[in-house]
Amino acid sequence: MDAYNREPFQKRVGSRLSVFTVEEKPLLQALPAAPFEISTWSYKRKVNANAHVVWARNFYSVPFSHIGALVDLRVTETMLEVYRRDERLASHLLLPATTSNQYRTNEADLPEGRSFQAWDRTRIEEWAARIGPATVTVTAKIFETVFIDEAGFDAALAVLRLSRKFPPARREAACALALRGPIRSPRYAHLRPILDTGQDKTGQVPEPAPDDGGYVRGGAYYAGGHR
């Protein structure tokens, strides 16, 4: 290769080596200090109530002021970065793919003082137990429907936070009533109508909402009646 590069051009002065040395080499720049990494982007991931975002069944902290916001994740072989629009909120070393339910937490992402306590399943279940057994069952059924506990936090907390408008006795009665109905895993969307209409006071099991999303021909159509 060296001999080939030194071989003189046939129709011009110089060689490949001389062209490189004189014209190209002065323009070369140093390689980046950090090697380039191919990244994967995941968009519109919600920051959970415990100030963490889920990726590959593990959890990475985000500044608590962004709880409830939708963020984008940039993931490489070694790092996970959290962006909100064009602002980078956090960066973490990526947990191994073989782990699950593990946390990467920057202490600066959480508020100072003991008044803040991250939500976890134990804390949610303790709150439900203070309300009653039916509420415990409803939250347990929510957790049964998700692959990882954190995915059920928002749904469970939505049920418990009905306390902002309804007393514990009514919430417990609504949960008990919903569990007698056809819904396998009652949630806020099922409990709120029960409370708003006072069905928890009458003990009447709510009927499932009719499905009027499409046009259905009557039985006469299929029996040979008039169209």
Image: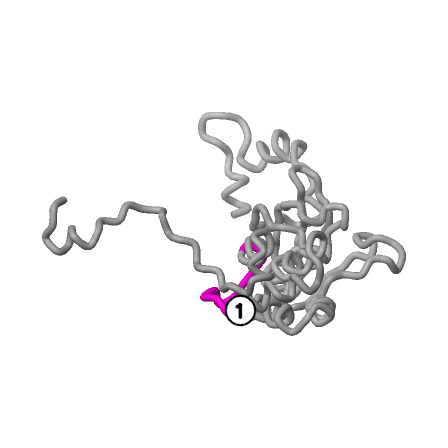
Residue 21 percent location from the top left of the image: 63, 35
Mark 1 burial class by Cα count in 10 Å: few <14, some 14-19, many 20+: some
- In the rendered image of this protein, does residue 125 appear above or below residue 87? below
Q: Amino acid at mark 1?
A: Leu
Q: Residue 200, located in which quarter of the rendered image? A: bottom right
State the residue at coordinates (50%, 43%): 4
Q: Main secondary structure of the magenta part?
A: loop
* Identity of the residue furthest to the bottom in this view: 133
User: Is residue 89 in the magenta section?
Assistant: no
The reply, left or right, for residue 90 in relation to residue 202 is right
Viewer-proximal residue among 185 and 100:
185
Q: Exactly how many numbered labels are in the figure?
A: 1
State the residue at coordinates (48%, 66%): 181
- In the rendered image of this protein, does residue 27 appear above or below residue 100? above
The reply, left or right, for residue 107 in relation to residue 67 is right
Quadrant for the C terminus in the image:
top left
Q: Which residues are magenta?
A: 178-189
State the residue at coordinates (65%, 36%): 28
